[in-house]
Image (cartoon, coloured by chain):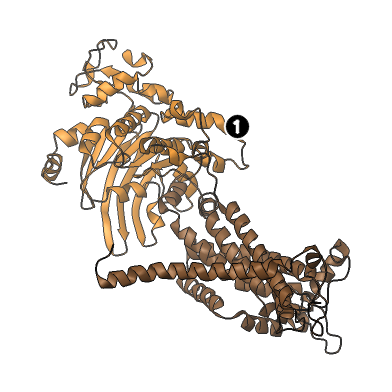
């Protein structure tokens, strides 16, 4: 037990901080469970949102926003992951020329720090250009693009998912012992082969951690969904949207996600049905939690029997 | 004569030989030496004759069957003027610090060349320049030539990856990859083949490499075990097997035993002696006793200069240079 006063303050301070943080997080989870579980049932998960605001409790179900979250997360991650891995390999393995490494480093930090609504606004300006109409659809009156589609939103989502993927992967790369790279070179491996066979298997946990964080950012983002996906909570996808002939058109159209539904159903939005907001928040929480566990498992490396 | 006597190697004999810290004498004039060169590597070590250390060429006769004969010596160097590696005017610097000031060293084919000298004398840099690992450091600058079978490895358009398979390297710390034993050994072969070969087709080569490294009997029942679960000595022999799988002509070893206990060290030394002949070994060592036990040739480096090279015996026992004598005597090191 520490004797000096400053030690004691530090010791109890650290101890208390841990306890406090754990208590806060568990309270939130408990609150979410208590308020959310009451509203989550099969109907809630399988019906579309409905207009509310006049009568409380008619904000409908969450099937369309749930699908929206899944699709936007999958698409955003699919774009961000290869890009992020390549960037991390560049920063961690090559890093030359120096000015490009430093520029990339700064860019990653900037993306991390800037709120997503800034990127959303930027995306709106870019994607509404008529030459990029293939990403969304045309506004008949002006000839501009709507800049609201799954494509537009996922591109920007990929951008905000990049920093955690890059940083986490980069940190893992730096932990691969140099002696192993040298051993591979000494066995006549090329640089590419060394990265593929020695570095990559070792950094899988780092990649999956980064991916989890990146997916969390996408699933949790609201600003980009409002601006680049339309946040169209009350416009559910056409029946049969998932059929191959309709799917591309669906991706060109607007949509909503769980985060936008939570806003819609909360007392701040027009759905005005607090319980349903909790329900949707709980589903989102569960989704992220499951992704965490699954990816965490996948990231664990198997290297024969120990 | 007895060089053709192919009795299989007996471990006990070897340990005895090692324990007596025997030293062999090169027998340059004899035509019997070729025996080890092309034969099966596991047999090379047997090409040993009971000879009194220090006695010249003609004395190599006698009955090889005599178990009480003096320690064996190897006859695996066909022709000391046949060089596997010839280092010519090698000058290496990192940034503004010049580590090697232009050295010339010969490594006769099939022999064990020990690079000795105090820390910081440039031995490791020299070794790493022989398979061009030195240039991984961005500031490294290399001048001079290293002739592998007469061809300069620093010539333009040299295939680095091929070079590094021809000149294999074993590092100071055992550094197996975090994979199974099998995958570690198969690592180099997999890259050599264009398509990814199946496990079955790699097995003969993997087994042969593990046999040569003297590890097969210990691991054959469980090749899927993680290499990281092995002991340090086993890991180092696995690293040797991994290098041997690429079938190198020259094996570079950078203090391969410095992280190992005496028992494991003895096994590796034994292995080096067995391997010599079928390939050329260049070993950096801090351990003079080790150099005496295993080396045919020695080169003594001091502060980036070559002070002396020649037959190991001559360098260690009859040195022409005062600084070598001081180093061997332990006055500095």
- Coordinates of residue A154 in the picture (x, y in percent): 70, 71
Would you say A300 lies left or right of A18 here? right
How many numbered marks have been drawn onto this rendered protein structure?
A: 1
Q: Which residue is mark 1?
A: B201
> Color of chain A here?
brown
Give the letter of the orange chain: B
Give whichever of A249, B52 is nearer the camera.
A249
Would you say A30 lies left or right of A19 here? right
- Residue B299: quadrant of the picture: top left
- Coordinates of residue B253 in the picture (x, y in percent): 34, 41
Give whichever of A149, A222 is nearer the camera.
A222
Give whichever of B42, A23 is nearer the camera.
A23
Q: Residue at x 37, y 46 (%)?
A: B130
Task: Tell me if I can see residue B229 in this picture.
Answer: yes
* Mark 1 Cα-neighbour bin, 10 Å: few <14, some 14–19, many ≥20: few
**B96, above or below A180, in the image:** below
Task: Tell me if I can see residue B248 in this picture.
Answer: no
Asked which secondary structure carries label 1, the reply is: helix
Q: Residue at x 27, y 65 (%)?
A: A2
- Coordinates of residue A75 in the picture (x, y in percent): 70, 66
């Amino acid at each position: 037990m520490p004797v000096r006063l400053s030690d004691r303050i530090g010791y109890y301070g650290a101890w208390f901080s841990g306890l406090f943080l754990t208590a806060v997080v568990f309270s939130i989870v408990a609150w979410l469970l208590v308020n959310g579980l009451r509203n989550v049932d099969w109907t809630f998960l399988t019906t579309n949102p409905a207009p509310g605001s006049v009568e409380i409790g008619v904000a409908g179900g969450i099937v369309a926003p749930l699908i929206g979250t899944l699709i936007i997360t999958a698409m955003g991650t699919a774009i961000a992951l290869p890009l992020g891995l390549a960037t991390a390999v560049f920063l961690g393995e090559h890093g030359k020329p120096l000015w490009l490494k430093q520029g990339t480093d700064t860019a990653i930090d900037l993306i991390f720090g800037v709120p997503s609504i800034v990127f959303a606004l930027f995306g709106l300006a870019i994607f509404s250009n008529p030459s990029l109409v293939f990403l969304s659809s045309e506004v008949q009156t002006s000839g501009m693009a709507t800049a609201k589609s799954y494509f537009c939103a996922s591109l920007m989502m990929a951008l905000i998912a990049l920093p955690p993927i890059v940083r986490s992967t980069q940190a893992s790369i730096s932990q691969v012992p140099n002696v192993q790279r040298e051993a591979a070179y000494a066995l006549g491996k090329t640089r590419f082969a060394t990265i593929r066979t020695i570095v990559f298997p070792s950094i899988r946990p780092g990649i999956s951690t980064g991916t989890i964080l990146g997916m969390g950012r996408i699933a949790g983002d609201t600003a980009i969904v409002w601006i680049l996906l339309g946040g169209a909570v009350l416009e559910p996808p056409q029946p049969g949207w998932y059929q191959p002939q309709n799917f591309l058109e669906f991706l060109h159209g607007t949509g909503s996600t769980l985060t936008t539904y939570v806003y819609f159903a909360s007392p701040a939005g027009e759905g005005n049905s607090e319980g349903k907001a909790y329900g949707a928040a709980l589903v989102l929480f569960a989704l992220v939690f499951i992704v965490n566990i699954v990816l965490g498992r996948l990231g664990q490396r198997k290297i024969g029997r120990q | 004569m007895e060089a053709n006597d192919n009795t299989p190697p007996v471990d006990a004999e070897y340990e005895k030989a090692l324990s007596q810290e025997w030293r062999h004498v090169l027998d340059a004039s004899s035509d019997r030496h070729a025996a080890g060169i092309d034969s099966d590597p596991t047999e090379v070590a047997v090409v040993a004759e009971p000879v009194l250390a220090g006695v010249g060429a003609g004395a190599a006769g006698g009955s090889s069957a005599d178990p009480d004969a003096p320690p064996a010596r190897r006859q695996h160097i066909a022709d000391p003027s046949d060089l596997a590696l010839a280092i010519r005017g090698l000058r290496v610097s990192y940034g503004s610090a010049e580590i090697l000031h232009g050295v010339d060293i010969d490594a006769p084919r099939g022999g064990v060349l020990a690079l000795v000298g105090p820390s910081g004398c440039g031995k490791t840099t020299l070794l790493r320049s022989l398979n061009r690992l030195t240039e991984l450091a961005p500031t490294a600058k290399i001048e001079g030539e290293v002739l592998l079978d007469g061809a300069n490895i620093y010539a333009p358009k040299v295939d680095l990856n091929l070079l590094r398979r021809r000149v294999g390297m074993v590092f100071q710390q055992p550094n197996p990859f975090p994979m199974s034993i099998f995958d570690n050994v198969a690592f180099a072969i997999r890259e050599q083949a264009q398509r990814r070969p199946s496990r079955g087709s790699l097995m003969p080569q993997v087994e042969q490499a593990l046999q040569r490294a003297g590890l097969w009997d210990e691991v054959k029942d469980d090749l899927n075990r993680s290499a990281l679960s092995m002991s340090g000595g086993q890991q180092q022999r696995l690293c040797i097997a991994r290098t041997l799988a690429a079938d190198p002509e020259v094996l570079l070893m950078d203090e391969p035993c410095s992280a190992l206990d005496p028992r494991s060290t003895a096994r590796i030394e034994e292995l080096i002696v067995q391997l010599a002949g079928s390939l050329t070994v260049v070993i950096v060592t801090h351990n003079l006793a080790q150099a005496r036990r295993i080396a045919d040739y020695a080169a003594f480096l001091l502060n980036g200069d070559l002070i002396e090279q020649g037959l190991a015996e001559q360098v260690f026992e009859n040195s022409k240079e005062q600084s070598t004598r001081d180093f061997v005597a332990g006055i500095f090191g």
